[in-house]
Amino acid sequence: MQIRIIAVGKVKEKFFQDGIAEYEKRLRPYTKLRVIEIPDEKRPVTSTPPVERVAMNKEAERILDAIPEGSYVVALDILGEEWSSTALAEAFSRWEMAGTGQIVFIIGGDLGLAPAVLSRSNLRLSLSRMTFTHPMARFLLIEQIYRAFRILRGEPYHK
């Protein structure tokens, strides 16, 4: 199984870059992980809702273009389902047994995800009802993916 994370925006903070790199390294024995950064759409600081809608739709086009054909798509959405780490591990097991070759997680930018991206997703998953910065969400997601693989293999980490 291959995992792809499509994320709007770059991670600028070194401490997040370092943490993400560490978990990417830890994941290598378990899965092939690829992170695709989609540029966030530039707009004025005081943009109007119509301008924001246009920006979100442009980001959506780039996101949708980056999803490989036949992928199982998980959109991170604050209104999505909340799962435990064990539930995520069980989902990876189900996806693997079903022959799902590619899992794609999508992290939106500061505007969130456009309806077109949400409708393309097979699952909407929430990391929390709290709002996190984009880099924090990426770090948390990668850590949870790593934790899920450790749980699946009965390896000590998740307790």
Image (cartoon, rainbow, N blue to C red):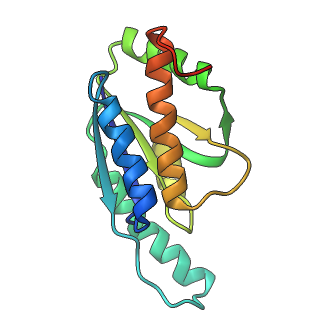
Q: Looking at the picture, how far across and down is residue 109, in whole percent? A: 50, 64
Which quadrant would the C terminus be assigned to in this image?
Answer: top right
Residue 96 at x, y percent in the picture: 37, 14
From the viewer's side, name the closer residue of 82 and 134: 134
Q: Is residue 94 above or below residue 62?
A: above
Residue 58 position within the rendered picture, expressed as x and y whole percent measured from the top left: 39, 70
Residue under the point 48% across and 69% down: 56
To which quarter of the image does residue 47 belong?
bottom right
| Side of 134 where 17 appears, left or right | left
Please, is residue 78 above or below residue 81 in the view? below
- Quadrant for residue 101, please give it: top left
Could you say where residue 130 lies in the image, as x and y percent from the top left?
72, 52
Question: In this view of the protein, can residue 74 be seen by the observer?
Answer: no
| Quadrant into which the N terminus falls | top left
Q: Is residue 100 above or below residue 138?
A: above
Direction right: furthest residue: 129
Residue 61 image-quadrant placement: bottom left
Residue 59 lies left or right of residue 70; in this view the side is right
- In front of the other: 130 or 63: 130
Residue for point 60% across, 91% down = 46
Q: Is residue 89 above or below residue 111?
A: above
Residue 134 in sight here: yes
Q: Residue at x 40, y 48 (%)?
A: 20
Q: Nearer the viewer, residue 127 or 108?
A: 127
Number of numbered tags placed on the structure image? 0
x 37%, y 65%: residue: 10
